Amino acid sequence: MFRWIHPTKRRYYIASPIQDLFGDWALVVCWGGLDSHLGGTRTVWAASVSEIERQIAAISRRRQRHGYVEAPARPLS
């Protein structure tokens, strides 16, 4: 899981690569406000792991240009 936080706007952006039971890859992207329950989710299907890696790198560059900083992923528990 990859996570970016915008400290002044109190926003988050998360990208999680997943593989389904058929071996297909997808990138689940979630975003929203840290202080609200509002946000959204999008699933982007990919042909390979390398395509997922390229998408994550592009998301990271875009988020950093918009003032987000990379944050460590929190455990689910």
Image (tube, rainbow, N blue to C red):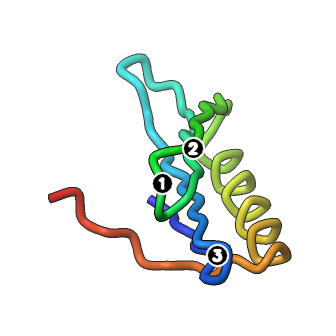
Q: Secondary structure at mark 1?
A: loop
Q: Answer few, some or many: residues within 10 Å of disc 2's Cα (few below 14, many 20 plus, some between 14 and 19).
A: few
Which residue was labeled with disc 1? Answer: 36
Q: Nearer the viewer, mark 3 or mark 1?
A: 1
Q: Answer few, some or many: residues within 10 Å of disc 3's Cα (few below 14, many 20 plus, some between 14 and 19).
A: some
- Which residue does the image show at 54% across and 44% down from the upper left? 38
Amino acid residing under circle 1:
Ser
Query: CB atoms at circles 3 and 1 under 8 Å apart?
Result: no
Which one is earlier in the sequence, the residue at label 3 or at label 1? 3
Task: Find residue 6 and report its image quarter.
Answer: bottom right
Q: Is residue 51 above or below residue 77?
A: above
Q: Nearer the viewer, mark 2 or mark 1?
A: 1
Task: Please provide percent x and percent y for residue 35.
Answer: 47, 63
- Which residue does the image show at 54% across and 56% down from the upper left? 14
Amino acid residing under circle 2:
Gly
User: Left or right: 23 with respect to 70?
Assistant: left
Query: What whole-number distance in Å separates the C-alpha atoms at marks 2 and 1?
Result: 8 Å
Q: Answer few, some or many: residues within 10 Å of disc 1's Cα (few below 14, many 20 plus, some between 14 and 19).
A: few
**Quadrant housing the N terminus:** bottom left
Query: CB atoms at circles 3 and 2 under 8 Å apart?
Result: no
Query: What whole-number distance in Å separates the C-alpha atoms at marks 3 and 2?
Result: 14 Å
- Residue 39 is marked as 2
Q: Is residue 58 above or below residue 45?
A: below
Amino acid residing under circle 3:
His
Q: Secondary structure at mark 3?
A: strand
Task: Find residue 10 and report its image quarter.
Answer: bottom right
- Which residue does the image show at 66% across and 32% down from the upper left? 44
Q: Residue furthest top?
A: 22
- Residue 54 is marked as none
Which residue was labeled with disc 3? Answer: 6
